[in-house]
Image (cartoon, grey):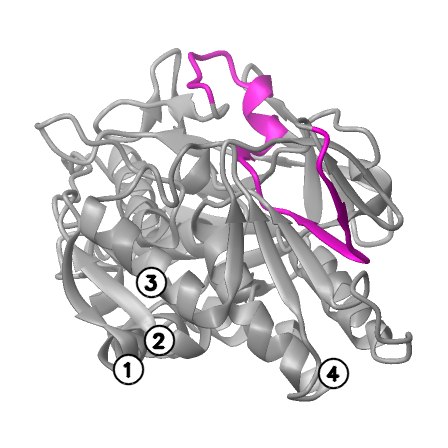
Amino acid sequence: MCMKKQILIVGSGFSGMWAAVSAARLSALEGNNSLSIAVLAPVAELRVRPRFYEENVSMMVAPLTELFAELGITFIAGEAQRIDTSSKTVLYRDSNGAIADVAWERLILATGSQTKRPPVAGLAEYAFDIDQLDSARLFEQHLDSLVSRPSTPERNTVVVCGGGFTGIELATELPARLRTRFGANTKTKIIVVERGATIGGRYSEALRNTIEEASSALGVEWRLNSEVEAIDASGVTLKNGERIASATVVWTAGVEANPLSLQIDGERDTQGRLIVTDTLQVPAHPEVYATGDMAHAKTDDVGNTALMTCQHAIQLGKFAGHNAAASLLNVEPYPYRQVNYVTCLDLGSWGAVYTEGWDQRIKSVREEGKKIKVAITNELIYPPAADKAVAFAAADPLAKFV
């Protein structure tokens, strides 16, 4: 009996999960029994990270055990420590803390990204983030703990450091989250500290204006052209000397690829993502595929590049899984292309905004926008049912997505 050739996917997020399902799909379509597909991750669950700014963050996980079992995907509980491309192994720490290794024929790196934490004084000690499930849960517990504190401006103020997508969604959600805890009569303050000169500087003018309108309606204040000098137990000091008293400082500025990317011999972009070919392979190591937030991949032929978003991670995963399996089954790979691009930005109780195209043309706002947002984050991005036909149809890289 010949040994099966193993495709190892490191990570069970949007990209890793879809890579596994897509590889299983092609293997089944080819009627081929020569592949084994394994996923290495700490827990067999998908953490719905785009929703970590919301309340009840502990609920934002989707179990994968049944799906993997149904599709014949092996799950290995552990955390990758070292990738060895010469021996084609990954060293990992298992759930008991012991070190083990797993061999592979094709490796798909889907370990995602993390918040950049620059050496700002007090950031490590005093700032919260909503980057990972555990830290988002800590932040929620902190908000709960504020209820028992006396009502002071410091208690009632939250400072959000960084006005990108995550910062905007969190800041606009916070007035309602504080109202739930402090009651409607408590005057609260949400301040976004942003180093850019405009609100939503990287977005279209129409989208910027919408964010500004929602912020203003919700009483969210922006400090533009501003950077954090230091954070302490009772607030932040800005580089211009301004002091903001606050018991709650959240860091949402900047994101970088998981440092495992540094173990692969290859070119990286400024966010640490591995620059990959059209088929999502690392040029120096064609047996290694990078996907999701680990990959710098072009989405089309007019110069657009995949962003660190779940929208891109899902499709990148489908292509990476397909192509890794294709390379072992002598099937032609699919060059990754994702021409459509949408954004859907939640804006708290004001509603949400939905845009289409890289030029971000506004299609829906307020309640209509919110309906779309809920459809996307509560349904569209969740794993498929543990049913072969349903899961495989959804995992086809060429099936319509958005």
Q: Nearer the viewer, residue 17 or 330?
A: 17
The type of residue carrying mark 2 is Gly
Q: Position of residue 217 (x, y in %)?
A: 41, 70
The image shows residue 302 at horizontal and vertical percentages of 8, 28
Q: Earlier in the sequence, mark 1 or mark 2?
A: 2
Q: Residues within 10 Å of mark 4 (few under 14, many from 20)?
A: some
Residue at 42% from the left image edge and 12% from the top image edge = 267
**Which residue corresponds to mark 1?**
367
**For the residues marked 4 and 2, what is the alpha-carbon distance in whole angstroms?**
22 Å
Q: Circle 2 sits on which residue?
A: 351
Residue 372 in view in this figure: yes
The quadrant the C terminus occupies is bottom left
Q: Secondary structure at mark 4?
A: helix
Q: Amino acid at mark 4?
A: Phe
Residue at mark 3 to residue at mark 2: CA–CA distance: 11 Å
Q: Which mark is residue 213?
A: 3
Amino acid type at mark 1: Glu
Proximity of marks 3 and 2: CB atoms separated by less than 8 Å: no
Q: Which mark is residue 182?
A: 4
Answer with the quarter of the image where residue 174 lies.
bottom right
The reply to whether residue 107 is in sight is no
Residue plotted at (70% across, 88% down): 183
Magenta stretch, residue numbers: 241-270
Residue 23: horizontal and vertical position, in percent? 33, 50
Q: Is residue 217 above or below residue 339?
A: below
Please state if 284 lies on the left or on the right of 227 as rendered: left
